[in-house]
Image (spheres, helix red, strand yellow):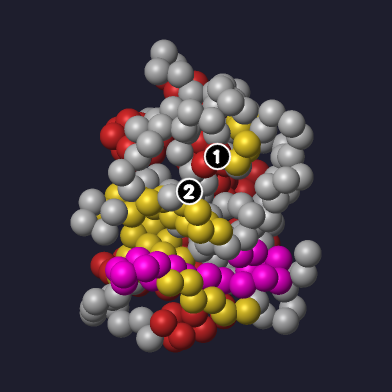
């Protein structure tokens, strides 16, 4: 059995098909970990969702910010839904839309495998969190997304405040702060306050900001973290972190990371020629 983590697909269906073929993926024996942002921008988000949904018995999915945005659009009135981009409208107008949206809403924010020693998230973990805290906070948000109050959460989750985690946070502020950390974080200051505007590669940020996995005083965790979200960071391995968003939708690559070998192994396919290169 092989276990592969796959970076941000973002509706890039042909590349996902080619990557699975390159991996010789066998759903009866192998497992896939998707690090979030299955949808948006690539043009074939519906096909990606349908494929991952079919493979759900052999897959793990953590939610990304674009996945959560789709869930938020899905609960809006028809007039507001009609204003979203054509890629997501195809998902919302599909005959199996309700099944796909309900399934997506039931996915995780964090997946941890103690035997492998790997933890999967979309963006990252707050510098002050232990793994145990992160798992507990992820479950809080997941239960809220799956529960009867999920509409209120999806309507109120947007916003950059609070930008820093505190155990004193309660209610919607607590859930929003957690979602921002799990799905939107790249840089933060020494106190863990997120800067949502800076998105470039390490070295391009202003003084006083750090990649979330380099913040001074970062809590040590007995796990390796696999994440995506940050295409400008690209493929990265260091400081206990493996980043696998290699910008497929921007003309880069779609990357998988094999997790079950002696050493993690990167495998990638190039984006389709029509993808916008940056």
Query: Splitting the image into 4 quarters, where does residue 161 fall?
Result: top right
Determine crowd level at label 1: few under 14, some 14-19, many 20+ residues with C-alpha closer than 10 A: some
Q: Callout 2: helix, strand or loop?
A: loop
Q: Does residue 259 show up magenta in the picture?
A: yes
Which residue corresponds to the image point at 56% horizontal and 22% vertical from the top-left?
191
Mark 1 lies on a secondary structure that is helix
Boundaries of the magenta span = 246-264
Looking at the figure, which quarter contains the N terminus?
A: bottom left
Rendered location of residue 101, percent (x, y): 43, 54
Any mark on residue 112, and which? none
Q: Which residue is mark 1?
A: 214
Position in image of residue 78 (x %, y %): 60, 47
Instruction: Establish if 72 lies above or below 228.
Output: above
State how far apart marks 2 and 1 are (Cα).
8 Å
Q: Position of residue 65 (x, y in %)?
A: 55, 46
Q: Residue furthest left?
A: 115
Residue 252 left/right relative to 179: right
Q: Are the residues flagged by discs 2 and 1 in contact, CB closer than 8 Å?
A: yes
Q: Which residue is mark 2?
A: 239
Q: Specify which label sits upstream in the sequence, 2 or 1.
A: 1
């Amino acid at each position: 059995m092989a276990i592969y983590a796959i970076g941000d697909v973002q509706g890039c269906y042909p590349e996902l098909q080619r990557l699975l073929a390159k991996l010789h993926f066998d759903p009866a024996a192998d497992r896939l970990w998707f690090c979030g942002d299955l949808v948006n921008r690539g043009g074939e988000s519906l096909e990606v969702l349908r494929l991952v949904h079919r493979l759900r018995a052999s897959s793990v999915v953590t939610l990304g910010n674009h996945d959560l945005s789709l869930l938020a659009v899905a609960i809006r009135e028809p007039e507001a839904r009609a204003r979203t981009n054509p890629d997501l409208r195809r998902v919302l107008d599909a005959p199996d839309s309700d099944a796909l949206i309900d399934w997506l809403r039931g996915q995780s924010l964090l997946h941890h495998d103690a035997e492998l020693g790997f933890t999967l998230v979309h963006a990252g973990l707050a510098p002050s969190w232990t793994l145990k805290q992160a798992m507990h906070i992820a479950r809080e948000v997941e239960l809220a997304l799956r529960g009867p109050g999920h509409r209120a959460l999806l309507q109120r989750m947007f916003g950059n405040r609070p930008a820093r985690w505190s155990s004193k946070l309660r209610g919607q502020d607590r859930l929003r702060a957690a979602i921002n950390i799990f799905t939107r974080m790249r840089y933060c200051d020494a106190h863990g306050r997120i800067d949502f505007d800076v998105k470039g590669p390490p070295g391009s940020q202003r003084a006083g900001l750090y990649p979330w996995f380099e913040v001074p005083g970062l809590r040590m965790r007995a796990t390796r973290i696999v994440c995506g979200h940050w295409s400008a960071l690209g493929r990265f391995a260091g400081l206990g972190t493996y980043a696998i968003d290699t910008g497929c939708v921007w003309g880069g690559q779609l990357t998988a990371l094999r997790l079950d070998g002696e050493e993690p192994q990167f495998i990638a396919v190039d984006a389709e020629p029509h993808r916008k290169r940056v």
